[in-house]
Amino acid sequence: MVSTVSFARLRISFALSLLCVLSSAIARADQWTAPTQEELSMTSQAGAPGAPAVYLFREEITVDHLHMYSEYVRLKILTDGGKDHANVEVKYVAGGDMGFSITDVAGRTIHPDGTVIPFTGKPYERMVVKAQGFKEKAKVFTLPDVTVGSIIEYRYKVRWEDNMYTSPHWIVQNDLYLRRGHFSWFPTDRELVTSDERGQMVSTLAWTPILPPGAEVKRTELPGSNLSHDGSSQIDLVVHDIAPSIEEEFMPPISSLGYRVLFYSSPYRNPEEFWKGEGKYWSKRRDKFIGPGKGVQAAVQELVSPSDTQEQKLKKLYAAVEGLENTDYTRERSRNEDKAEGLNAVHTTDDILARKRGSSDQLAQLFVAMARAAGMKAYLMLVTNRDRTIFLKNFLSFDQLDDDIAIVEVDGKERAFDPGSRYCPFGHLAWKHSESAGLRQTEGGSTLAGTPGESYQASGIIRVANLKMDETGVVTGKVDLKFTGAPALKWRQKALTDDKETVEREMKEHAEHMLPGGMDVKVLSIDKLDQYEEPLTVALSIKGPIGSSTGKRLLVTGDLFECNSKPTFSRDKREMAVYFPYPYNARDAIRINLPPGFEVESVPVNKDVKMGKTAAYDIKAVADGTGVTIRRNLLVGEIIYLPAEYPDLKAFYGQFEAKDQEPVILKVAGPVQATTGSGQATSVESITLPTTQSQTQKP
């Protein structure tokens, strides 16, 4: 009895101590801060020249015991562009058992003379995404009378349901300079010691810090807690003078680069133990779902022939999976809809096959099941979408892994397949899954692995224009576009989610962006949208003025498809690696037939430019008695160029981009009005695109 009473007293003492600590933290967050004279008068920030605004202070506090997160911001407006920060938008998931809510919104504006204008308005809600069983909303409010020199302050709280567990991710660095920041988390025993679905204890709260020198996450035992038993504690980070995150052309995902702290709970002592242990359990669960079961086995027997090679079998199975509905691009069915169709819950790949539909991940798992049923070694791989982030081995969490792909051994060699990416060609990966990393199955377990890259030959666009020009400088004719690989996949998946009119309108806008201004562009056809093994083809008709008139001469940009292009790399120095989405090739051919009285005075000199063995460019212009033909090829064979390689890369792009803008000079008998007129065109003699030598080998 005595021990019971003592324990109760200890619990009460601890609760009171914890309440005092939390109350103090929350009280601080609810107070406004008096600005200093230096803050009121400041016009710039050392270390961030030209910055539109600067964070004077930013604080985030997460209190699990209260199911609450609060944010407090003090921000100085330095330029007109910085005034946009007066419009605050807080996104959150609304409704249901896993819903959040935004409360206690408050704010004020302080002018440079010290005048305070409180926010008295009411935030309004905006729907961001609404899908079956899911709603993402935003709480939006605008701080009053913000001018250059103002200081704005605001705070709000995010609350969640009692049955929810959440852990913060501290994003320390963003697009504005941070003078001082404070991040704090009060986890409870439930977060520190839990039981997973296998009944094993998951303890030891840990974190992956990506921070500047001198910044340190500190964990403090609260009064009455016992850190040796993972009791309640306070975790803090104080930072100061954090420069804005670097934003340059063609960067890796920005969320992977900035200073941040990622929390996780794990009983493992190191990353090797975590990925081996959890990976083995993940693989077993996936194998239980994959099977293959009797339904998959029967379907495979009907699809393939014993005389088929492994390649032939796999192509048939891939086509069968691609032919099913991918609900990531349509919609998921409700439980009642499935019940009305006589369908049970999804427990195995047999259930996916019976439905003739599934999510991207489910279809990838079905493809693995079918390959196994055909007698082949097939494995699932869970990869990071590198359009979103970069895989971090030391972050012990499956949250960084996004999508399933398949690894199949074909004729003794493993190859990667992406059946969950709708319309991805056989034997290829969507670019976001190529040259990425993740966790893959092996015989009897799993291992961390990378995914293969794609060749520059896999993704490209061919642009062919056959045009006839009249006496006023107006051209009329046809443009044919041919997309392969990643560019084709982008348009095909867009056609799955948008209607025909939307796709045609965006294709028209895409062409207008390439061609000279004032062009009348019409989409004649978009073909082979669902034939993923074939190039996607687009036919356009165009009519409009080209070039600029200088008396009796007309100057036409050599490659009409590049006339609106801007320099890709403008900075002299580079902090981050250049990170292209995918290697690619681009091939252009333009034929301009001239009217009587016009002749070609000069064309750009042919030019070849190379950057080692990773990139190449060539352009050739040929004039004859009736017109001029320009052919251009560009090949980029790598996706990553390190900062040390940037000067060479910038020089390479600078050379060919300048060459693209060199004009063809047409000589005429009289003055030309290149921007007016509506001459009628006659039939255009077609041209043939030969395969250039630079296309047959990697540059």
Image: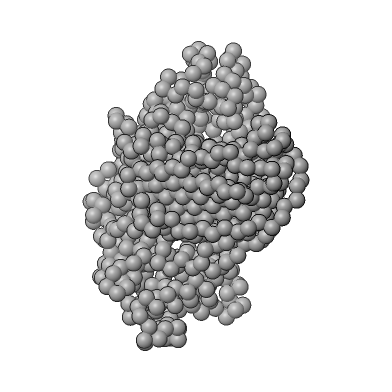
Q: How is the image coloured?
A: one colour
Name the residue located 51 percent from the left edge and 79 percent from the top edge.
Answer: 354
Res 676 → quadrant: top right
Observer-nearest of 414 and 523: 523
Residue 645 image point, x, y percent: 33, 38
Q: In this view, does 404 lie to the left or right of 202?
A: right
| Residue 159 drawn above or below residue 197 | above
| Residue 399 drawn above or below residue 662 | below
Observer-nearest of 379 and 263: 379
Observer-nearest of 429 and 366: 429
Name the residue located 45 percent from the left edge and 59 percent from the top edge.
Answer: 691
Observer-nearest of 348 and 95: 348
Residue 21 image point, x, y percent: 40, 34
Name the residue located 67 percent from the left edge and 53 percent from the top edge.
Answer: 477
Residue 678 image point, x, y percent: 76, 45
Q: In this view, does 488 lie to the left or right of 667?
A: left
Name the residue located 31 percent from the left edge and 36 percent from the top edge.
Answer: 644
